[in-house]
Image (tube, grey):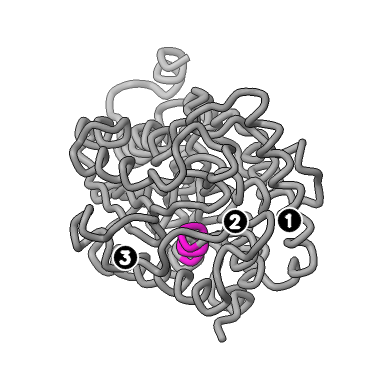
């Protein structure tokens, strides 16, 4: 059986020596330290992740979306119809979803992986559905989301996708989900791992729900938490009990991406929940992740705080599918460009240092 704790020995932190070199180089640039705000920190983080000073440009980013349906959606806890995640996938493939529009404009390819959609495979292309672990997930308030064997298969699927991306030269991942009902298991995982109550992590979801649906969702998370707490010591068992194939695959993807030293930008509450499970397995793993945006989901806030990740943007994008995180990509690319291309003071000839600093200020 796969043991997620083994990742703790496989994952190293980004190169601290390289980060010091990047910080020292930043001190020598013509623009005064601190004048670029968080872009300085981003550039240094990226240099450490790459092991390169000056930092290299982000040339091959990719959006990776894991898709799945969740049985708990049948309780009316989502603004979308249960079993309808395949429609979200089709919108992405047809280029009419928010993430498809943003990715097209940014020139970033999008990859969709069906880990647990509840639809006939013939409705979608073979390259999307060929990885499916199971059809939908169990209703986590009364039954397991998946078996232990399926959870392991899903984690290994995510690991394999991470390896494929790293081997193909992808240098940064924007990670998102395409799910119906996915924020309910995600919030359950966060509440369980943070030791808090259902009401603290229950949000309105990507599609938005009314007060009655919110109360149903809160009750479902409360009941699922009773099933989650006995298996808190085993991350794989936790994903089997209250996760789902898509969440388990995302967790495996995040952990293997850290092993392969491939940075990942997280999107909303679903990717944050998977990251939190990953942190429990390997405490150094979050050093390879960025929080792309603050979605407004209370569970996401809780998870990011636990991992000490500060979001790059606060636009309240709740649509999911990696759209909010993709909005943060230009910031990462800008940080890399500034860190790499701004000249050092001694390389600028003919302008006294005090005059340059005065002009920059």
Rendering quarter of residue 197? top right
Above or below, comparing residue 107 to residue 254 in the picture: above
Q: Residue at x 60, y 68 (%)?
A: 240
Q: Nearer the viewer, residue 321 or 35?
A: 321
Rendering quarter of residue 28? top left
Label 2 packing within 10 angstroms: few (<14), some (14-19), many (20+): many
Label 3 packing within 10 angstroms: few (<14), some (14-19), many (20+): some
Give the numbered dot on residue 166. 3
> Which residues, given as a range, are shown in magenta?
245-252
Above or below, comparing residue 247 to residue 304 in the picture: below
Residue at numbered disc 2: 139
Give the numbered dot on residue 193. 1
Rendering quarter of residue 351? top left
Q: Nearer the viewer, residue 290 or 49?
A: 290
Q: Give the overall secondary structure of the magenta segment.
A: helix
Give the CA separation, mark 2 to mark 1: 20 Å
SS state under label 1: helix
Q: Position of residue 16 (x, y in %)?
A: 55, 59
Q: Position of residue 211 (x, y in %)?
A: 66, 24
| Residue 176 appears in the rendering | no
Callouts 2 and 1 close, C-beta under 8 Å:
no
């Amino acid at each position: 059986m796969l043991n997620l704790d083994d990742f703790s020995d496989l994952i190293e932190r980004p190169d601290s020596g390289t980060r010091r070199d990047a910080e020292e180089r930043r001190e020598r640039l013509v623009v005064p330290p601190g004048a670029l705000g968080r872009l300085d920190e981003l550039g240094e983080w990226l240099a450490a992740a790459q092991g390169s000073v000056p930092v290299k440009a982000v040339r091959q980013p990719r959006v990776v979306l894991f898709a799945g349906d969740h049985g708990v959606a049948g309780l009316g806890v989502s603004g979308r119809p249960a079993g309808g995640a395949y429609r979200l996938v089709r919108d992405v493939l047809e280029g009419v979803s928010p993430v498809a529009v943003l990715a097209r404009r940014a020139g970033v390819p999008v990859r969709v992986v069906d880990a647990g959609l509840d639809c006939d495979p013939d409705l979608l292309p073979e390259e999307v559905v060929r990885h499916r672990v199971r059809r939908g997930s169990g209703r986590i308030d009364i039954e397991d989301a998946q078996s232990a064997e399926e959870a392991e298969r899903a984690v290994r699927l995510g690991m394999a996708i991470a390896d494929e991306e790293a081997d193909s030269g992808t240098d940064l991942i924007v990670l998102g989900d395409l799910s119906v009902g996915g924020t309910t298991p995600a919030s359950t995982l966060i509440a369980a791992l943070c030791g808090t109550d259902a009401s603290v992590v229950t949000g309105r979801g990507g599609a938005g729900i009314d007060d009655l649906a919110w109360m149903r969702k809160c009750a479902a998370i409360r009941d699922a938490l009773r099933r989650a707490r006995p298996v808190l010591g085993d991350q794989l068992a936790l994903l089997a009990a209250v996760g789902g194939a898509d969440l388990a695959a995302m967790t495996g993807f995040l952990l293997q991406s850290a092993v392969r030293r491939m940075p990942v930008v997280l999107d909303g509450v679903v990717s944050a929940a998977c990251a939190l499970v990953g942190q429990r397995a390997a405490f150094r793993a979050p050093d390879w992740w960025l929080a792309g945006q603050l979605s407004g989901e209370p569970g996401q806030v809780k998870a990011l705080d636990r991992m000490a990740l500060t979001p790059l943007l606060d636009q309240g994008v709740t649509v999911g599918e990696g759209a909010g995180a993709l909005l943060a990509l230009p910031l990462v690319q800008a940080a890399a460009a500034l860190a790499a291309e701004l000249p050092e003071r001694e390389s600028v000839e003919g302008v006294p240092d005090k005059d340059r600093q005065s002009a920059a200020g």
